Image (spheres, coloured by chain):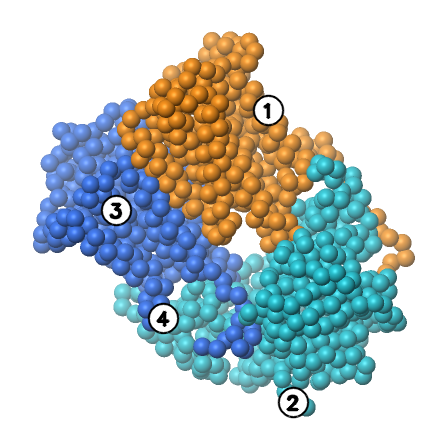
Chain colours: A blue, B orange, C cyan
Amino acid sequence: MIARLFKSREMLLALAIAILIAGVATRSAEFATPRNLTQAFNDSSILIILALAQMSVILTRSIDLSTAANLCFTGMAVAMLNKFYPELPMIIIILVALLWGLALGAFNGILVWKIGIPPIVVTLGTLTIYRGLTFVMSGGAWVNADKMSPAFIELQRQLILGIPVLSWIAILVIVVFAIFMRATKQGRNIYAVGVNPIAAVYVGINVGRTKFVAFCISGLFSGLAGYLWVSRYVIASVEVANGYELNVIASCVIGGISIAGGVGSVGGAVLGALFLSLIGLALPVINVSPFWQMAISGAAILIAIILNARSDKQKGRLILKKAQNP
Amino acid sequence: MSLQTRHIPDRLDKPLTSLLLSWEVLLLVVAVSVFIFNSFASPHFLDVWTLSDMTFNFTEKALLALPMALLIIAGEIDLSVAAIIAISSTLMGFAAQFGFQTPTLIFIGLAVGLACGAFNGALVTGLGLPSIVVTIGTLSLFRGLAFIILGDQVYKNYPTHFDYFGQGYVIWVISFELVLFLLMALAFGFLLHFTTFGRKLYFIGRNPVSTQFSGVNVKRIKFILFCLTGVMSGLVSIALTSRLGSTRPSIAQGYELEAITMVVLGGVAISGGAGTIPGVVLAALIMGLVTFGFGLLNVPGIVMSIFVGFLLIGVIALPLLWKRFLWVFKK
Amino acid sequence: MPSLSLQGISKSFPGVRALHNVNLSLYPGQVTALIGENGAGKSTLVKILTGIYQPDEGSITLDGKPVALSSAQSAFALGITAIHQETVLFDDLSVAENIYLGHAPRGRLGLIDWKAMNQSASATLAKIHVSHIKPATRLGDLSIANKHLVAVARAMSIDARVVIMDEPTAALSAKEIGEVYDLVALLKSQGKAILFISHKFDEIYKVADRYTVFRDGELVGDGMLANTSQNDMVKLMVGRSVDRVFPKRASVKGDVVLKVQDLSHPTEFDELNFELRAGEILGFYGLIGAGRTEAMKALFGLTKPSRGSITINNELIAPKSAADAILAGLVYVPEERGNQGIAAGLPIFMNVSLPSLKQTSKNNVLRLSEEMKLARHYTERLDLRAASLSQDVATLSGGNQQKVVIAKWLARQPKVIILDEPTKGIDIGSKAAVHEFMAELVAAGMAVIMVSSELPEILGMSDRVIVMRDGLIAETFENKNLGAEQLVRAAAGIAA
């Protein structure tokens, strides 16, 4: 029974997070207070949204290396929009962020679907293209807090029921995405394509179009994350989220999303992102230099992969009757 | 059975035709075009010393592309090469602080590279883990270690002769780095195209299972490749540190993606089993020419990378589109 | 009045004319067998029927009305379902989802209703008498036979008019095959039109009412089975009479070459004891999962036995890898040609020379002329049909690919050659060629182990037969007056 519990990646992660929080709380009780934990969730919101974005792509046996660049480009676009048109209602800003991100994701998706270029090659290219275009669009200039309208900055910090809007957005994304992946045809197609692309063709699933949809979702969420990032850190520049792809993929791997495709849950991705994020938040509290964060993430990824592999290791065929005794 | 044995010819196509239609020739045409463009666009380009300066620009990344090509042909990948450069450079700098001299530093650089490569290799071949995620993990781990050791400091006190590798010349305008690269390119080219070891890589990339069933020790070969990649990363680390004269933990950031771009541009299939060293060398040359040429025109690096991104996608898309065009046309 | 009728169907791909002007009619409550060699166009036809391909020419009518099967969904919606040879389903999804993927029951807001899906799945599984499979089980956790039953359930989850079964008994044990025949009878009684693709004549004669024969993408004959003899059928398929499928040969046996004693593995097999002489073909028969392939893999060094010994010519060998076994003179032609035998995408000559690189190279430097020489010699000996030695091995037919694999191993001049299901999925012409060749090999003194699940092949080729059951050797027979019944009983553990 206990063994069955351990097989679930989600349970294992939840346990690890609990231990982490408990451990840090022994050094500093402040860490485990509801107020602080809510803050921690808030700090993890963007990573969670990005991890879900990446998850849909990885499930289809693809990868999206351009999510951070998408975030950067879209963030700059809405920041500049806000700078030049500060009266524009926030709903428009968010809509632009979603559509801009979607377009960038769709570009990736079209290249994969219609031309058949391997996803790693496409997103390796767009990773530099999108960041480069950010430079071109902004002329290298930054957009700082003083150029942003109050609404732009305040929206995500508003509290509803004591929880910031940023967190609510993350929760909304989690719920919508979970329903999408569990209960819609497109969502199940994403899983099917990852589990067995050949069988998917046989049951009439358009594999290329499904991958396109996955890249669109990735772009959509990355665009949203772009707005959230620039308004949270009140900066839009070419350097935004530089190298962040790594954290995103790490969250997915730690969350049990298999790089081979077809396996992984929304809960896992969320917990993976939370875990990674918590490590970063915990370090200063226990007086470990932030320079340790990268190495610790690396170790966490490696441990996660080893555990991933253990669970889907193929058992040797059980043929002998005597070997089958319970 | 048949009364007379049917004779099967060795090959049907004419070697020359298939050579002319090859990817490598396409790359050669592109390389020459970029060269010509550069010489028109920048008056100083055709100066010997300018050209020599250009080589510094790409030889380090090109040196990484060589073992990376072998790995990708064999169906694996190593995203941690730049991080290996970082930790190798950090440990060399650390030793330099204590007064160790150049020969020792060389040894440390290469040894650290080898150790990291072996670590990667052990995880991939020993535990059977997918190399893409393993090396994403080790990339964080290795560079993370560099950050732990160095923090936000810089190592600068390298011994006097250490700068030869990155800044020295062998003869006239020919830099040491260029000579090193050319020698390595020849060595890797020979290894891949003329030895039994190289032949096996193509098989492993196409079908590791049937290759194992044919008596090839797939695990050992992959382990060797990861070690080789590690050592080469160590070598690049020496050259780069020597050229910069200093070490920061962020050294060589992004080099792995550039190396992979060179490899893919060079005609190596990302799924394994195909590709040549001449192709990779030409692709490295193209990227060097483009980067340098844009640099001479004062185009910011980040804008130029847009071009590289489109180049990569375009070059891979071209044959795919051509095939599709041909098929539609035939109907 | 036929349920489904195809007229004048043609389909081509770049460089290949897969089907040309074929006609086929399927009648309600009747089974039509589709027969033809590999490459005759059968799988292309199935893909057209299930909407995955569209024909270049020709028409399709369903109950007399013309239809366009423009996609897999539309074919499925019209009631045309297929059970493919290899179960093409989703291991990481649940049984229920596999049955209902693409047509899951919807609830509120048009979202998938998982509860209803699980319930419907249970109902469908009960309909085909398979209630022991639970809908929430992960498909990958089921046995091969049970996965196949889920594929059947998927086909039954809609009210099918046409059921296509492509080599449905290829990977099944005798008992499971019987269940398939019962299922066919059930479907017939429900008035469905069945297309039954098989290459096993005894099965076709047992199950089908009508037949259609394809050769090289064209229809060469059709009719009622009652009016046609097996030999006529073969002639139609191949264009010539083939009665030399199992060459007759004198068996002159030499010394013991291979001796296996007490070979055991923790989970796969136990206490294997047998000997093999030069000039002998030792057949290994058994049900799927009896442990034969596992035993052979251990002999070849791919898996590690827990105890026991292997000697070749009285020398003890303990192979820790395939390379060790090859050095000792033992080679293995694997069961799955595509996955385990060849490297697709690479030329024929390279595939042949791979285990012999050390011998054809000098100081590890490749010598292409030596490789070509080696490849030429062995492929010509096997009468390989290929345009050139530099041709991509993936473009060859199954039978020719198998010849490449055998050529590759002969080049090592082994003492013992193990052939695992050597003629599985191969056209009858190549089958005969492989059997002829095996006879030549043993006449020349080689020792051969042949693992096979085809009773005619086992009985036709072996000098002795070892029957394995559940990882153990059940019985060993001399092939004198040996009957299929004895083998089947030993394999299934049924007392006489």
- Estimate the spatial distance between the alpha carbons at disc 2 and disc 3, rounded to whole Å: 65 Å
Q: Which residue is mark 3?
A: A279
- The residue at 55%/44% (across/down) is B222
- The residue at 42%/51% (across/down) is A259
Please say if the residues under marks 2 and 1 sit with CB atoms less than 8 Å apart.
Answer: no
Q: What element does badge 4 sit on? A: loop
Query: Which chain contains the residue that carries disc 1?
Result: B
- The residue at 52%/39% (across/down) is B227
Q: Which residue is mark 2?
A: C495
- The residue at 32%/69% (across/down) is A2
x, y percent for residue C304: 59, 62
Kindly identify which numbered label has been placed on residue B183: 1
Q: Quarter-wise, where is residue C445 in the image?
A: bottom right
Same chain for marks 4 and 2?
yes
The amino acid type, in three-letter code, at marker 3 is Ile
Same chain for marks 1 and 4?
no
Left or right of residue B217: residue B124: left
- Estimate the spatial distance between the alpha carbons at disc 3 and disc 4, rounded to whole Å: 43 Å
Same chain for marks 2 and 3?
no
Q: Which residue is mark 4?
A: C105
- Estimate the spatial distance between the alpha carbons at disc 2 and disc 1, rounded to whole Å: 73 Å
x, y percent for residue C383: 81, 55
Mark 1 or 4, closer to the camera: 1
Mark 4 or 2, closer to the camera: 2
Query: Which chain contains the residue that carries disc 4?
Result: C
Q: Is residue C321 above or below residue A114?
A: below
